[in-house]
Structures are given as structure tokens and as C-alpha cells.
Amino acid sequence: MQVSKRILVTGGAGFLGSHLCERLLADGHDVLCVDNYFTGRRENVARLMDNPRFEVMRHDVTFPLYVEVDEIYNLACPASPIHYQFDPVQTTKTSVHGAINMLGLAKRTRAKIFQASTSEVYGNPLVHPQVEAYWGNVNPIGPRACYDEGKRCAETLFFDYHRQHNVEIRVARIFNTYGPRMHPNDGRVVSNFVVQALKGEPITIYGDGQQTRSFCYVDDMIEAFVRLMDHPKLTGPVNVGNPGEFTMLELAEMVLRQTNSRSRIEFRPLPVDDPTQRRPDITVAREEMGWEPKVPLEDGLRETVNYFRQMMM
Ligand code: NAD
Ligand code: UDP
Ligand code: UDP
């Protein structure tokens, strides 16, 4: 039988956070969702409000937070380039001060704490596919650095609180994840292409479209979060993502097929420091957590298209 826990989810009103809150409530836990609504939306958690085990608090994690909890999932941070580059100083503060505050909270309450890290810690990788032991290739002063270096510093803090204060940590390096409740105009490739196709607007491919990414469906990702948190000892960092690798051109063609759209493809300049390839090596997650993604891109994309179709109606 599962014991009911008090769980804090920072960034709980965002894309991944709202799916995580839903899952934890379904598992019978008390969930406290903390969010400053920078990119998150109350609609994302509206359906959960009737649940007496669910509570929402407007709060910015760069400020201290005093609550009593058993577990913390630290997801607060804008995740798309458009949003994290809007106020880069605040992005670094959210990652770094946010991590310090949540780790201080974990230390005081002896809570286990999960960090939503990112494949961006590998930067523009020189090792392919990326393994956890790879230290990365990040430009520390470019426009993506506020996010990449903020997340790298957060990882440093997690491992130092672990070594110095025995805080129980779980660090997941998340690769591109997509699904319902993605922000329709956060500029990420899946939401962009789907919305453009449904509106009949040109599909914007940056560069020549030969750069690759691997896309993990949100349900698979949430399962990985919970498995890592529940693991008896694995601190990570653990890569979590779908090892299927696609070029942006292939993705565009798949979206066009699924939406029966007549949008044409338009090529735009490649953004600065845009990684040319990215694919997770998930051997550690497979062997230690017994986890691997189950939803193929075709299927997940269908759910995502349905979501945006309904949203636009
Ligand atoms: P999202 O933007 O939908 O969610 C982030 C949430 O954090 C939002 O609700 C936002 O309002 C909140 N937030 C931002 N700054 C805050 C602050 N200072 N205090 C409190 N709340 C704050 O993005 P997401 O895709 O759900 O990403 C969630 C986490 O996962 C992020 O930490 C992100 O870096 C990480 N991640 C996501 C992906 C992905 O593909 N979706 C990939 C790698 C890592
Ligand atoms: N903190 C918090 N909630 C708590 C405990 C601590 O937000 O329940 C914050 C606190 O503001 C502090 C930070 O976490 O600045 C780091 O805490 P820690 O105990 O590591 O450091 P110290 O309090 O010694 O600065
Ligand atoms: N991209 C694109 N068209 C768009 C949005 C993004 O071709 O409308 C490309 C982008 O240049 C990158 C890839 O798609 O190479 C993934 O971009 P996203 O911002 O979704 O994620 P990240 O770069 O953080 O992996």
C-alpha cells in the first residue's frame, strides 16, 4: 500500500508541473502547487481545484518559502528560449536562488528533492548521443547561458547540499518534452509547427532543418519523474527523454501529414548557439529505473494536435 505524502511542486501551474500535480493527486498524495504564473496558467490546474488534497500558492521561488513537506519537485523556471531570454537575469535568479531556497527548505524539513535539470547542460554537444558523464559544451556568455548556466549551477548546488548536508537529491536531465498544455506561443518547435499548421500559416524552419532533436511525450516523462523520486538511492543526474531522433524537417512533414494542412514550409535564420544535434543515451534510466518511453512521436503528436485544435476552437 502506498503512503500518502505532502508534496510540493514548484512551477506546478506550467506544462510539466500541471501534469505532475495531476499524477501525484491520482496517486493519493497532498499536493502544494507553487507558481508565480510567469509562464504557467491557472487554467492548467483549474480542474484540480475541487480536489481537497490540492492547494495552490502564488509565490516566486527566488524568495524563501516556509512550509512543511515530505517531498519537493523543483520545476520552477521558464523553459522555452523566448521566455527564458525575456528577462535573462530573472532566469538565472530563478534557477540559482530558487535552488538555494528549495534546498534550504529540503534541508530543514528533511524532504527528498527532485530537480528538473535539462539537456541544455550539454550545450552544443561534442559527444553524441549524450551520456551523463559528458561535461558539456556550453557558451557561458551567449544568449542561452542564463538558462544553461543557471541549470548547471543548480546541479552544483544540489550535489553540494547532498555532500555537505546529506540532503536526499534526485536530478533529472530532461530532454525536449511535448504534449497537451504546452504554451501555444512559447516558440518551441512542436507547439509552433502544430499551431502554424492548424492556422494554415507557413511552417517556420530555422536553418536548413537538418538539426535534430528527440521528443518525449509528457506522460512518459511524468512516469520518469515519479520513478526517479521513488528510487531508493539514485541521485542522478539521469537523462530522461526519448532516444528517437528526428530532423526538424521530418517533424514538419509529420505535422503537415497529421493536420492535413496545406501550409508551406518557410526557412528562417538559425538562432545563435542553436545545438545541431541532441539525443539522450538513456541506459542509466533503463537499467536503474526500469524506465523507457512508450509513446511513439506519431501517437503523442496526435494527442497534441487534438489539444491545440480544441484550444483554437
Ligand atoms: P513551463 O514554462 O510551462 O513551466 C515552468 C513553470 O515555472 C511556469 O508555471 C512558471 O510560471 C513557473 N515559474 C517560472 N519562474 C518562477 C519563479 N521564479 N517562481 C515560481 N514559479 C516560477 O515549462 P515546462 O516545460 O513545464 O518546464 C518545467 C521544468 O522542466 C523547467 O524547470 C524546465 O527548465 C524543465 N525542462 C523542461 C523541458 C521541456 O521540454 N518541457 C526540457 C528540459 C527541462
Ligand atoms: N529557506 C527556505 N525555507 C526553509 C529553509 C530555508 O526558503 O524552510 C531558505 C533560506 O532563506 C536560506 C536558503 O533557503 O536563505 C538556504 O538555506 P540554508 O539553511 O542552506 O542556508 P542559511 O539559512 O544558512 O543561509
Ligand atoms: N525550431 C524551428 N522552428 C520553430 C521553432 C524551433 O525550426 O518554429 C528549431 C530550433 O531552431 C531548434 C529546434 O527546432 O533547432 C528545437 O527548438 P526548441 O526551441 O523547441 O527547443 P531547444 O532548442 O531548446 O531544444
Image: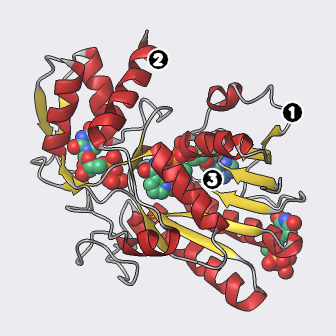
Q: Secondary structure at mark 1?
A: loop
Residue 35 visible in image = no
Q: Secondary structure at mark 3?
A: loop
Q: Residue furthest bottom?
A: 164
Give the side of residue 31 with respect to residue 307, left or right.
right
Could you give the CA–CA distance between mark 3 and mark 2, rounded to whole angstroms? 24 Å
- Residue under label 1: 52
The residue drawn where x is 80% and y is 25% is 50
- Mark toward the viewer: 1 or 2: 1
Q: Which residue occupies the foreground of this view, 48 or 66?
A: 48
Q: Quadrant of residue 255?
A: top left
Whichever of callouts 1 and 2 sits on the residue coming sooner in the sequence is 1
Q: Secondary structure at mark 2?
A: helix
Q: Position of residue 85 (x, y in %)?
A: 45, 51
The residue drawn where x is 75% and y is 79% is 167
Q: Quadrant of residue 61?
A: bottom right
- Mark toward the viewer: 1 or 3: 1
Whichever of callouts 3 and 2 sits on the residue coming sooner in the sequence is 3
What type is the residue that disc 3 sits on?
A: Ala
- Residue under label 2: 311
Could you give the CA–CA distance between mark 1 and mark 3, rounded to whole angstroms? 23 Å
- Assess whether mark 2 and mark 1 are in contact (beta carbons under 8 angstroms): no
- Residue under label 3: 76
What type is the residue that disc 1 sits on?
A: Pro
Q: Is residue 283 above or below residue 246?
A: below
Could you give the CA–CA distance between mark 1 and mark 2, rounded to whole angstroms? 27 Å
- Assess whether mark 2 and mark 3 are in contact (beta carbons under 8 angstroms): no
Q: Tell me the quarter of the image containing the C terminus.
A: top left
Q: How many marks?
A: 3
Give the side of residue 81 with respect to residue 160, left or right.
left
